[in-house]
């Protein structure tokens, strides 16, 4: 039995070490900061829309990132989806290879369409400015939330993981370290809500696709 | 052993399996103005829930995990333990399984609820405390209770606290401790449910005495032939009461009821509940320092 708990701890440490490399701090000049997940190679980072909005309620066109390596980089806003509280940033590395330092490696993204209530999940973020803070729990329910403007019904993940301001934009991961959602405090109105990664994936794909068309 | 290769994954899968199993026997109970609460499939056509969530006795709606809606009738309720039993017009596919033995401190548990038609809800924690007897906010006495740090989400009242294999350890309710969540141990809840199924209410007895605990001197404990630190000294015996009819006198010390030692008033109250009501019951007393057996027919208290 002791061995079982030891091995469980080892498994958690491994997952935490891996996911923390893909979690960044996102600041937009205001006080307070949120989290972001390195989603795609090339420095594409997903965060919450509310993390990059400034005092006037509009999104800032740039943000500052602090990577897990402590390297600080500027980022440009690529796309937003305010209704589900998502924003996509691109890290502005001074060099051509955005992953030259190996500190912009994307997280493993899991399929969030086959989740089950009761499964163990971990959250990583920066609650109250505490960097890379880890909390654990289970998926407590799989429900829907109605968006404010277009009254769309979207799937959301609720968990009993403790989340606080600063967890916003950070990942919710499963027991193999795959990102199943992006934590947010806004959609659904209550704490412990995550936007499923398949919605995030669709947003990122659409955003990067559009961008490609515009520059072509 | 695959569980040792990936123990976290194995634990996670065990928890989802427990939620799936117990969730099949966790139902939605809609019998109040605010949002619905939860209930447990206690028997093929019976649902155990919290008394305080049954605000109306008609038009009680139960929604099954498969989404079918049934109108339930009230079998009986026990406000003092905050439990109510409902009857369904048809049989349930799954019934809750009760965990054998008593809950252990620190044991992993899941709190389950189905307050929304969207699906089962769960939270994870441990058994944080095992206590009792405690007087409840609703005038009753709860022999034993559990507490857990698993989050009690709104509408979890009447839902089960289950072990890691999905067996019921207790019934969660926020109706007994001023809104704080408390868990009625499954053995106790099932006992209340079985009485409600039989009689429609919990029979509470009385014998018509006022008493106070007193320490028993070593000599008297020797006379009893056991170690028992205290008994109940009778300070008054009501006229015409079961106690008087049975021959109890002021100054007698009650030390046991039906073979079970009684050391304080709460234990007497607990012992006067259930099937003993209306029955001639042996009381062991000390009179003048000497043990004596008397038989008292326990009266039924009408609320």
Image: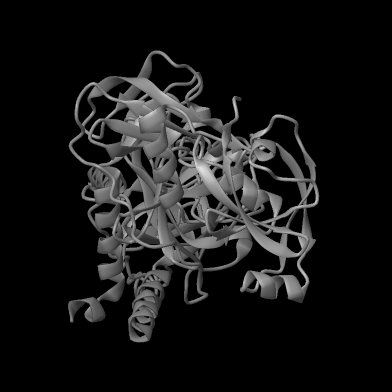
At x 49% / y 68%, what residue is drawn? B106
Residue B135: image location, x then y, percent:
66, 45
**Can you see residue A182?**
no
Q: Quadrant of the N terminus of chain B?
A: bottom left
Tell me which corner region of the image, top left, top right, bottom left or bottom right, holds residue A146: top left
Q: Is residue A49 left or right of residue B165?
A: right
Relative image position of residue B246 (x, y in whole percent): 63, 41
| Apparent side of residue A11 relative to residue B259 in the rendered image (left or right) | left
Name of the residue lying farthest toward the bottom: A3
Q: Answer above or below: position of A53 versus B125.
A: above
Q: Residue furthest top?
A: B58
Whether residue B127 is visible: yes
> Is B23 rendered above or below residue B100?
above
Q: Residue at x 53, y 35 (%)?
A: B82
In the rendered view, does B194 fall on the left or right side of A25?
A: left
Colour scheme of the rendered structure: one colour
Count of marks overlaid on the render: 0
Image quarter for residue B287? bottom right
Q: Residue at (21%, 33%) from the top-left corner?
A: B92
Percent from the top left, x then y, of residue B139? 66, 35
Front residue of A6 and A199: A6
The C terminus of chain B lies in quadrant: top right
Q: Image quarter for residue A57?
A: top right
Q: Position of residue A106 (x, y in %)?
A: 32, 66
Note whether A137 is above or below B196 in the view shown: below
């Amino acid at each position: 039995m002791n061995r079982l708990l030891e091995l469980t701890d080892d498994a958690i440490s491994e997952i935490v070490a891996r996911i923390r490399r893909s979690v960044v701090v996102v600041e937009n000049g205001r006080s307070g900061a949120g989290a972001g997940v390195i989603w795609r190679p090339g420095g594409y980072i997903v965060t919450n829309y509310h993390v990059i909005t400034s005092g006037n309620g509009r999104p800032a066109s740039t943000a500052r990132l602090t990577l897990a390596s402590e390297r600080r980089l500027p980022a440009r806003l690529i796309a937003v989806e305010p209704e589900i509280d998502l924003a996509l940033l691109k890290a502005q590395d001074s060099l051509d290879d955005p992953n030259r330092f190996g500190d912009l490696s994307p997280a493993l993204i899991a399929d969030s369409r086959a989740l089950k209530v009761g499964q163990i999940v971990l959250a990583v973020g920066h609650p109250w400015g505490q960097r890379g803070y880890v909390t654990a729990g289970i998926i407590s329910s799989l429900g829907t939330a109605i968006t404010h403007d277009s009254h769309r019904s979207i799937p959301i993940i609720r968990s009993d993981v403790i989340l606080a301001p600063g967890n916003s934009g950070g990942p919710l991961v499963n027991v193999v370290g795959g990102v199943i959602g992006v934590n947010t405090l806004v959609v659904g109105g209550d704490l412990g809500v995550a936007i499923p990664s398949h919605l995030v994936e669709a947003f990122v794909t659409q955003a990067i696709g559009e961008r490609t068309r515009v520059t072509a | 052993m695959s569980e040792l290769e990936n123990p976290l994954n194995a634990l996670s899968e065990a928890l989802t399996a427990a939620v799936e199993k117990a969730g099949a026997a966790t139902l939605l109970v809609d019998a109040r103005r605010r949002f619905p609460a939860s209930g447990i499939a206690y028997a093929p056509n019976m649902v155990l829930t919290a008394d305080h969530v049954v605000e109306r006795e008609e038009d009680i709606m139960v929604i099954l995990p498969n989404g079918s809606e049934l109108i339930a009738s009230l079998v009986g309720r026990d406000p003092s333990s905050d439990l109510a039993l409902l009857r369904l017009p048809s049989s349930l596919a799954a019934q809750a399984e009760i965990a054998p033995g008593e809950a252990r401190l620190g044991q992993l548990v899941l709190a389950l609820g189905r307050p929304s038609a969207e699906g089962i809800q769960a939270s994870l924690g441990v058994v944080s405390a095992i206590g009792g007897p405690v007087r409840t906010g609703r005038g009753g006495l709860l022999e034993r209770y559990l507490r857990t740090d698993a989050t009690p989400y709104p509408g979890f009242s009447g839902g089960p606290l289950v072990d890691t294999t999905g067996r019921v350890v207790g019934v969660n309710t926020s109706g007994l401790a001023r809104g704080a969540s408390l868990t009625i141990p499954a053995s106790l809840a099932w006992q209340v449910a079985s009485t409600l199924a039989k009689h429609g209410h919990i029979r509470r007895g009385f014998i018509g005495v006022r008493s106070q605990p007193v320490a028993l001197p070593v000599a008297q404990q020797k006379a009893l032939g056991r170690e028992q630190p205290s008994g109940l000294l009778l300070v008054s015996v009501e006229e015409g009461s079961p106690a008087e009819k049975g021959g109890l006198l002021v100054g007698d010390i009650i030390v046991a009821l039906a073979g079970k030692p009684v050391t304080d008033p709460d234990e007497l109250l607990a012992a006067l509940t259930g099937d003993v009501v209306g029955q001639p019951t042996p009381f062991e007393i000390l009179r003048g320092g000497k043990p004596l057996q008397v038989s008292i027919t326990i009266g039924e208290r009408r609320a």
